[in-house]
Image (cartoon, rainbow, N blue to C red):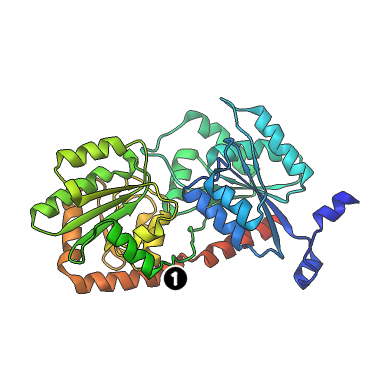
Amino acid sequence: MEEVLRNQEVDATSPTARRQPRTRILHVTFNMGFGGTEQVIRQLVKNLDPNRFVCEIACIDGEIGAIGKEMEADNGIKIHSRQRGSGLDWKIILWLRKLIRNDHFDIVHCHQYSPYTYGWFAHWGTGAKLIFTEHGRFHPDRYRKKARFINPLIARTTKSLVAISSATRDALVEYEYLPRHKIDVIYNGIAPLKVSVVRRETLSKELGLKTDEIVLGTVARLDAVKNQALILRATRALLDKGLKIRLLLVGDGAERENLEALAKKLKLGPAVIFAGFQTEPADYLSLMDVFLLPSFTEGTSMTLLEAMSLGIPTVATRVGGTPEIVMDGYTGILVESGDLKGFITALQTLIDMPKKKREIAQQAKSRFNKCFSVQKMVEQYACLYETNRNT
């Protein structure tokens, strides 16, 4: 009886809920630290209709992470955590399986490939339906022999496969041998950023920004795949043209020391600001006149969406899912990967043509509201959950 009651917990005020028990979803991921995948999970958990869905999260890397702790404290979200060992850790599989069975989850939603592997093994015999979302790809992408044999098999017993862009879907088909007809594309969505004018002005003064300076910037981990070195070189070229430029790099990571050394070599001095990791990067993002995304690969960049929500034009590389977000010449400017000259030219265009820059900014915000809102993403996943639960 206790088992039946738990599976049928409902909000008595909801007619829909009285007709059918709420759908119970277990999100399986690495951890809930700062990153695009974690932000997507947070948006889903916080914005799904609580009269229709109950969500919990399982982290397989032993750390709940900053976003997870915030969700526990502010929203009362239940987060499970266990550290996996090397290789395929069967203790993690058994742990997940016990969670799924004891808490009567209807859906196991796995985010990224390794959590998908563990979720696939764990869901067998529990009655739960399995969903896998691929949030991005490594660079360079590569073929794996075992994927040719294993992935088509596990795909057959997975209810739904999701990619966050058409480019990501294409990579799943080519490199992971997953069936194209079974992969849905659901773009990431976020709530538009809101920034305090007072806080923005205070931060600008703290950073020593001047009103006649053009602020270029990005928010990302400092990693070779993000190619921030190209931004530093582009900044040097623009300074040499006599432009008043400040470069704002928000984030931290393995490449920080190398990037700082390159900035010193290029004699950028105070023209570049290494702001480090920020728990609230929106204030920094709001200071940027142009958002830069020079990555070698991207899925659906959450910081790109955040910049668009603030009406900031973008110069980005034509890689991964970025061309599906940035309409070249309309909501931003796209250049080829690694093309320093093209990047400089694109920036010069926006700087020299302020009217065009304002138009692009307005169009970027409009496109965000139409295509990449959190409501649109949540509605698509809600439909997917309910369809799979009932089939």
Residue 52's x, y, as percent? 71, 63
- Crowdedness of circle 1 by 10 Å Cα count: few (<14), some, many (20+)? many
User: Toward which corner of the image does residue 328 lie, by quadrant?
Assistant: bottom left
| Residue type highlighted by circle 1 | Asn
Residue 249's x, y, as percent? 30, 50
Q: Say whether residue 350 is visible.
A: yes
Task: Looking at the picture, tell me which residue is in the foreground, 121 or 35.
Answer: 35
Asked if residue 63 is positioned above or below residue 289 in the image, the reply reads above
Task: Looking at the picture, tell me which residue is in the foreground, 108 or 47.
Answer: 47
Q: Can you say which quadrant of the picture contains the C terminus? A: bottom right
Which residue is identified by label 1?
369
User: Which residue sits at x=23%, y=46%?
Assistant: 230
Task: Looking at the picture, tell me which residue is in the foreground, 240 or 73.
Answer: 73
User: Which residue sits at x=54%, y=50%?
Assistant: 67
Q: Tell whether 52 sits left or right of 265.
A: right
User: Which residue sits at x=61%, y=39%?
Assistant: 154
Task: Looking at the picture, tell me which residue is in the foreground, 26 or 34.
Answer: 34
Q: Tell whether 61 sits left or right of 201.
A: right
Q: Tell whether 361 sits left or right of 125.
A: left
Residue 324's x, y, as percent? 38, 59
Q: What element carries label 1?
A: helix
